[in-house]
Image (cartoon, helix red, strand yellow):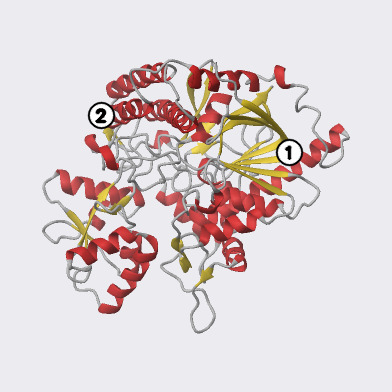
Amino acid sequence: MISMIQRHIDTDILIIGGGTAGCFAAITLGKEKEIRVLLAEKANIRRSGCLAAGVNALNAYITKGKTPQDYVDYARRDAAGIVREDLLFSMAERLNHAAEELERLGVVILKDKQGEYVARGDRNIKINGENIKPVLARAAAEQENVTVLNHVNITDYLVKDNRIYGACGFDVREEVFYEICAGAVICATGGAAGLYRPGHAGFSRHKMWYPPFNTGAGYAMGIRAGAEMTTFEMRFIALRCKDTIAPTGTIAQGAGARQINAYGEEYEEKYGLTTSQRVYGTVRENKEGRGPCYLKTKGIAEKQEQDLYKAYLNMAPSQYVRWVESGKGPAQENVEIEGTEPYIVGGHTASGYWVDGDRQTTIRGLFAAGDVAGGCPQKYVTGALAEGEIAAEAAYRYIKAEEKSKEISAGAAYPYSKAEGESKETSAADKKAEYEAYLSGEEALFTADDLEEAMQETMDRYAGGIGSGYGYRESGLKTAAEKIASIEKLSQKLHAADMDDLLRIYELKERLTVCQAVIAHLSARKETRWRGFGENLDYPQEDAAWEKYVNSRMENGTIRVFERELVKGGAAYEHTH
């Protein structure tokens, strides 16, 4: 029986996930020198998360003549009303501040002759952002009171009486178990990719729009700990350049390219211009025999073509290479487009934790920021930064209030750390034993990759993947739930030959937990609201009666789904705990 080395760490605030929101939360907390901050990341913060390869624009910005309320209105329309307007507004108020902070840290934001940021559309500004993640990572790591723990995979929260006391996980390279006790925890782990069979199966299955290493870990930890979650039925399907999965927005906005079918007919206005409608139109045109579909770039000016070359060379080199290899650039040939597999990502949709204005979840002391925080879509980079800042400020206020009530000094070891370890609902000892069982068990007849493929095939076929044109029925969802439950049982029999194998097992387990939530939410909403992101074939029309949130909570191992009324206008929601 393998016995892992055990390490215990006490800190004031634990940040899980070193991506966009996590790094900015650490930078924000760096101002509070009397507290200890630990940032745990399963990879390395220098190139982890959605910004690993860089970006060429900030897609959430209040441009000249616009207001934060304009941004709220845009996001609400795009999400067909199912948003938290209070969260959107508090985020939108900080978008420009976040952009200015990026520039201060060293990210190049393009400016015109008047010194104004160069706009790209109504809500975007242009940047040279190929090094945006190293810039954020360096700033986070340089904070005097911040310790970065790279290559540590956090799998479970330590919760008692609906209050968080820390988390546990393992080193992905060495047989080391970590128990981390904290006064507050900020979850910034990103969304979930790899739930559905991807457009590029087999050897290239991890070639996808959203980072394949984002497995929904934060969602899964929250679901298992009993946190309230929201809007998992609002999946995101990206409209991308075929095969390369390069962004289409840069072409659509930078070159004014419209969506056309194989006959050269523009079809955008026919289906609508929201994000989901653009996907839906492309799916329908293909299904009805008018595909393939394209972005109409043929005939654009030479300068526009050169600008696209530069943009994609920085942001998505595979698209640039494709143009070069074919000998036909976008000015000579239209760019074919297609939809991706579905993702759960709260930075584009409203999926994630149900949070209050401080981004505190329904578990006391647990905060969420970025893609894991629900109710607030269209975050993009600056929105994730804004939420990282909001969560960090709130977590600091929370631990200061806790310290005052306990009459302990800032930075002192928390009295609930080691002493209460055995009484926690999710005990560190149990998790350590679970890891060791995977490392010590007999080799199974199947691998984590085998079960992942079975999971993706199940979700694709029965829960509205690419193969079904994103459509699903109640009967299929029931089958999906049964099959996912069976795969989850099989996952308990897996064997890990090393720590990398153990990481793959837990990534699979995280995805399976998120799949359960997605299936439950899809089944609960008896309408089709985001046509393109998913079509309920039993209820193919939008229904005003469903202008509400579909929320859920896991109870005794089963996901219970319920509804909440919309939070609109100037109203605000706060937890009662």
In percent of width and height, residue 63 lies at 50, 68
Closest to the observer: 552 or 18? 18
219 displayed left or right of 302:
right
> Residue 469 lies in what quarter of the image?
top left
Image point (61%, 18%), residue name: 430
Q: Position of residue 419 (x, y in %)?
A: 78, 22
Q: Which residue is mark 1?
A: 11
- Dot 2 or dot 1: first in sequence order is 1
Check disc 2 and report its element: helix, strand or loop.
Answer: helix
Pinpoint residue 479: horizontal percent, then vertical percent. Answer: 30, 19
Callout 1: 10 Å neighbours few (<14), some, many (20+)? many
| Residue pictured at 64% horizontal, 39% vertical | 360
Give the residue pinned by disc 2.
461
User: Mark 2 or mark 1, which is nearer to you?
Assistant: 1
Residue 496: give x, y in percent of width and height.
Answer: 45, 25
Q: Is residue 41 found left or right of 234 in the rendered image?
A: right
